[in-house]
Amino acid sequence: MLVRQSRAERVLMALSCAAAPLLDCTDVTGRVGRRSFWSAMLLAAGLVAMGYAMDWFLFGSVQLARPDFFACFFGGVLALPLLTLGVRRLRDAGRNAWLMLLLFLPVLGWLLLARWWCAPSGSGTALARLRSRGCCATVTLSG
């Protein structure tokens, strides 16, 4: 029997599905799919935007001397979950987790990470995928 959900129940269900990957911020060995990743990123961006809005409404529109308190608070709280989320998405796409260090390379690193975060989920490592396609040649080193 189908149970009809109200609009509020559907919104709460969508928010809980988007927040689930963020709440699992200690697991860097797992994987997360594209849909869950981008839903969580959208939720995080919304929270930071809400922080900016709270700063603007509470402290006024001119903040020359004060930092954005709520935006910095939400950004600080979300820093670790977003880093682990990015690592799990790279792992799911078949990339090395150390590639998250490209965050420190402005623009080019961010574009590369965004490209890999948009990549489809892989079945294992990138090397295993290449071997299954027959694209990998064996290299022997003589010495």
Image: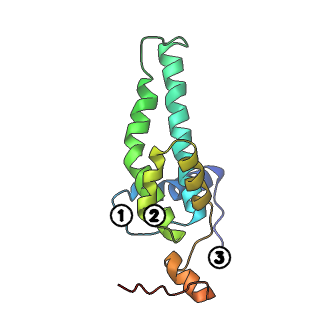
Q: Quadrant of the C terminus?
A: bottom left
Q: Are marks 3 and 1 in contact (CB under 8 Å)?
A: no
Q: Which residue is mark 3?
A: 1
User: Eyeballing the image, is 132 above or below 42?
Assistant: below
- What amino acid is found at the position of numbered circle 3 in the picture? Met
Q: In the displayed image of the protein, which residue is found farthest to the front?
A: 143
Q: Is residue 123 left or right of residue 118?
A: left
Q: Nearer the viewer, residue 89 or 37?
A: 89
| Residue 137, picture quadrant | bottom right
Whole-number angstrom distance, CA of label 3 to CA of label 2: 37 Å
| Residue 10, picture quadrant | bottom right
Residue plotted at (41% across, 56% down): 84
Q: Secondary structure at mark 1?
A: loop
Q: Secondary structure at mark 2?
A: helix
Q: Are marks 2 and 1 in contact (CB under 8 Å)?
A: yes
Whole-number angstrom distance, CA of label 3 to CA of label 1: 37 Å
Q: Determine which of the numbered discs, if any, sits on residue 88 in the image.
A: 2
- Residue 71 drawn at (x, y percent): 46, 30
Q: Which residue is mark 1?
A: 27
